[in-house]
């Protein structure tokens, strides 16, 4: 008897080809489209973009001759993803809703709907791979990078757990994007040449300040330019010793505390919580040879600190800290013990080249110290650590 797989058909080419791969492999495939958002506030595309997605998903299901259903998950999505995003921005942090969407919706709420349809497995069009091994007499599921390094989406899945992985399938993880489009064209799928979706997962491309003003109030504040600053005199390049003291680790991960007196006021903004570290747009301040970048925000005093040029030292951080309760291990069998240090490859944003780093597990959490200073480290982002091409764990950057 064929095993039933419920695949999330989004109306894009990736999930379309994933559905075909599953059918070609002999699975009993059912397509399920989820609508997770109704509000169009701040959207930069047509108000009915989700209706286009639904139409394309239905066309693909008909072409592949598979059952098709739709479900509205907007209530859990707002509560578990969007409300979290608003709360994080209000604190001056930079959340990643796509990571939360996978953990809380696609492999949780959606998976529950898949079970109602008799699904034994849940499939998505993510560019990543899964492998099953035995570790300590137990079955362990490994989350691996996708074959296409330009489209690898393992970072977005850094918060899933073993139970979620056990029933997950990633049919196109061994394919490249050009191969996927070629297959779609050969099959005559309506999504073959459709552009990839952009913006917030299931919301779309938005004007972020306008979108956030649904919940966060705009308020005038100062933009302060910082001309010179000397950071991290202890170690700028290279990794600290494996027995480094917590005092040293603190000094290498503590963000520099800016004060208005350190620079000069060069403009105003509509709310520090609308900005993130590394941002260069939206300040509307002229008179500089090189672009201005946000190097820090203070939501309590409502100040945005900026520096001129890509080489401004305020853009770089040597390390970061993740609280113990915000640390997640996909490979729980590899969880670090207190006092232990390990070398991993780390990324702090999607598509960033993996960076050499040393992780130190201490009582309050994990310190991650990079071999090279990293640009645009922002609280609220997810740091994800890899061993070669496997995602081992992740955590929300505290500072």
Image: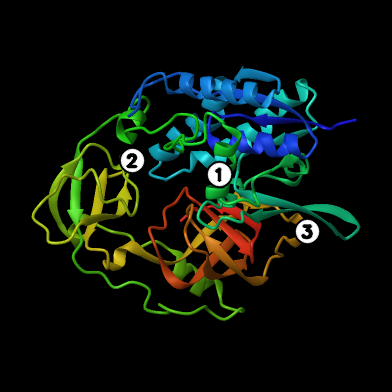
Residue at x 19%, y 53% (from the top left corner) = 224
The earlier-in-sequence mark between 1 and 2 is 1
Nearer mark to the viewer, of 3 and 2? 3
Q: Which residue is disc 1 drawn over?
A: 182
- Depth check: give the residue in front, 212 or 391: 391
Label 3 to label 2, Cα distance in Å? 38 Å
Give the camera-side residue of 104 and 38: 38
Label 3 neighbour load within 10 Å: few <14, some 14-19, many 20+: few
Disc 3 + disc 1, Cβ < 8 Å:
no
Question: Picture quarter containing residue 363?
Answer: bottom right
State which mark lies toward you, 3 or 1. 1
Q: Callout 2: helix, strand or loop?
A: helix
Query: Height in image: 103 above or below 249?
Result: above
Which image quarter: residue 200? top left
Q: Nearer the viewer, mark 1 or mark 2?
A: 1
Q: Earlier in the sequence, mark 3 or mark 2?
A: 2
**Which quadrant of the view contains residue 67?**
top right
Left or right position of 285 against 300:
left
Is residue 64 found left or right of 308 in the rendered image?
right
* Residue 270 seen anywhere in this rendered image of the structure: yes
User: In the picture, which quadrant includes the N terminus?
Assistant: top right
Q: Which residue is mark 3?
A: 333
Q: For numbered disc 3, what is the local secondary structure?
A: helix
Taking the image as shown, residue 182 lies to the left or right of residue 196, namely right
Q: Label 2: which residue?
A: 273
Q: Tell me if I can see residue 325 in this picture.
A: no
- Residue 295: x and y in percent read 30, 57
At x 50%, y 24%, the residue is 53
Name the foreground residue: 384 vs 236.
384
**x then y, percent, for residue 49:** 43, 23
* 263 vs 370: above or below: above
């Amino acid at each position: 008897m064929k095993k039933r797989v419920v695949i999330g058909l989004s109306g894009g080419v990736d999930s379309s080809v994933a559905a075909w791969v599953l059918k070609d492999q002999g699975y009993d495939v059912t397509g399920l489209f989820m609508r997770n958002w109704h509000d169009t506030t701040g959207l930069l595309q047509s108000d009915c973009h989700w209706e286009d997605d639904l139409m394309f998903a239905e066309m693909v299901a008909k072409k592949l001759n598979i059952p098709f259903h739709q479900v509205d998950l907007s209530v859990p999505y707002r509560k578990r993803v969007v409300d979290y995003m608003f709360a994080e921005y209000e604190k001056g942090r930079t959340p990643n809703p796509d990571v939360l969407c996978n953990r809380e919706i696609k492999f949780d709420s959606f998976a529950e709907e898949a079970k109602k349809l008799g699904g034994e497995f849940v499939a998505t069009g993510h560019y990543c791979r899964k492998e099953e091994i035995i570790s300590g007499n137990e079955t362990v599921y490994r989350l691996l990078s996708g074959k296409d390094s330009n489209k690898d989406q393992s970072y977005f899945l850094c918060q899933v757990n073993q139970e979620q992985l056990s029933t997950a399938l990633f049919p196109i993880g061994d394919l490249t994007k050009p191969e996927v489009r070629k297959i779609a064209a050969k099959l005559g799928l309506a999504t073959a040449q459709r552009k990839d979706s952009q913006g917030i997962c299931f919301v779309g491309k938005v004007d972020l300040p306008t979108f956030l003003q649904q919940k966060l109030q705009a308020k005038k504040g100062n933009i302060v330019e910082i001309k010179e600053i000397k950071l991290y005199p202890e170690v700028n390049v290279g990794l600290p010793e494996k027995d480094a003291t917590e005092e040293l680790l603190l000094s290498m991960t503590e963000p520099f505390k800016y004060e208005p007196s350190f620079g000069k006021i060069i403009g105003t903004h509509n709310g520090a919580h609308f900005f993130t570290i590394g941002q260069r747009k939206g300040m509307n301040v002229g008179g500089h040879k090189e672009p201005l970048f946000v190097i820090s925000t203070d939501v309590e005093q409502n100040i945005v600190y900026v520096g001129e040029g890509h080489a401004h030292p305020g853009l770089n951080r040597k390390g970061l800290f993740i609280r113990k309760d915000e640390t997640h291990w996909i490979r729980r069998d590899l969880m670090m013990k207190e006092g232990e240090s390990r070398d991993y490859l780390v990324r702090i944003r999607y598509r960033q080249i993996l960076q050499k780093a040393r992780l130190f597990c201490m009582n309050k959490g994990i310190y991650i110290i990079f071999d090279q200073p990293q640009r645009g480290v922002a609280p609220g982002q997810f740091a994800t650590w890899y061993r070669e091409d496997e995602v081992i764990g992740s955590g929300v950057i505290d500072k």
